[in-house]
Image (cartoon, rainbow, N blue to C red):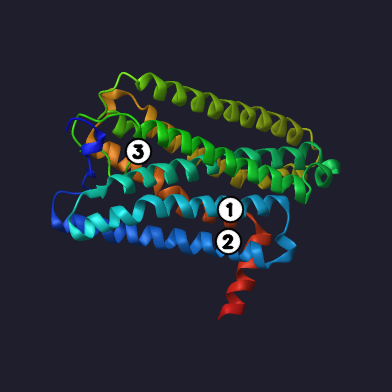
Amino acid sequence: MSNSSSISHFLLLALADTRQLQLLHFCLLLGISLAALLANGLIISTVACSHHLHTPMFFFLLNLALSDLGSICTTVPKAMHNSLWDTRNISYKGCATQVFLLIFFMGAEYFLLTVMCYDRYVSIRKPLHYETLLGSRACAHMAATAWASAFLNALLQTVNTFSLPLCHGNALGQFFCEIPAILKLSCSHSKLREFGLLVFSICVAFGCFVFMVFSYVQIFRAVLRIPSEQGRHKAFSTCLPHLAVLSLFLTTGTFAHLKPPSMSSPSLDLALSVLYLVVPPALNPLIYSLRNQDLKAAVRTIMTGCF
């Protein structure tokens, strides 16, 4: 293949070599995706319908659930389809769409987690100014900025990637379309442009990470100054779900992309990709609901009303 104009489709990495394992992977992905859809959908409906949950923390949690739904619906259905029908094909336009949506939803989740970190910082460090700093308009602006930033980043990354000529075949070493796998097929000297954009995105992500670290350092310092043990426990428990979700998101994604080359293998890469793409959207609602009594009570009320 001389260039990308002659490519009508890509070949994705098969989840398994045997038919039995393919069907097993289909069933596992189906179960995890249904659990993620149910759990995130329940959080969205609960927060939307429960007026006493219309607070900044739950507003951002609703947005986080939306990003989780989007990310798992971007890659898992196609992987399930390929496993069920024993195929590896994805169209050129379908691959571009998958890259855009994946970067969009993953970026939105990262930016929302950064905003949620600011929410926890204000609630503990400046509780008297909480309603002033995080009013409904301010929350809407922060959420809109997170989504808009993710959209712009995804658009730039996708356009730059698919404008490169491809001359090393059409087989991607991954079960979904991602930029690193596509760049391996490129023979263009303009990779420097894509590299510059990736460096810019990494700098933005690192800036968010530094902000989150600084915020939690200040949060822990404030919590340790609370005189009563019960007060310290209550303050820390409000941060624990966010910290757990943030750690899960960062550790799985970072290790999947920045692991040493000596540890790289097709089976390990596949397992890590499933870990950071499929598992977090299913676990995030569980992490938040386990530690939040208000959310658990609202979920029970919603479910009791439904049945």
Callout 1, which amino acid? Tyr
| Amino acid at the residue labelled 3 | Glu
Residue 288's label in the rendered image is: 1
Residue at 53 percent of width and 63 percent of height: 41
Above or below for 104 versus 81:
above
Q: In which quarter of the image is residue 2?
A: top left
Q: Residue 284: percent from the left, percent from the top?
A: 52, 51
For badge 2, the amino acid type reads Ile
Q: Which of marks 3 and 2 is nearer the N terminus?
A: 2
Question: Which residue appears at 21% of the width and 47% of the height?
Answer: 14
Q: Are marks 3 and 2 in contact (CB under 8 Å)?
A: no
- Give the Cα distance between marks 1 and 2: 10 Å
Residue nearest the observer in this picture, 168 or 254: 168
Q: Is residue 185 above or below residue 296?
A: above
Q: In the displayed structure, would residue 88 be above or below residue 196? A: below
Q: Name the residue carrying label 2.
A: 43
Q: Residues within 10 Å of mark 2 (few under 14, many from 20)?
A: many
Q: Are marks 1 and 2 in contact (CB under 8 Å)?
A: yes
Q: Name the residue located 57 percent from the left edge and 50 percent from the top edge.
A: 64
In the structure shown, which secondary structural element does the residue marked by tag 1 occupy? helix
The answer to whether residue 297 shows anywhere in this view is no
Asked which secondary structure carries label 3, the reply is loop
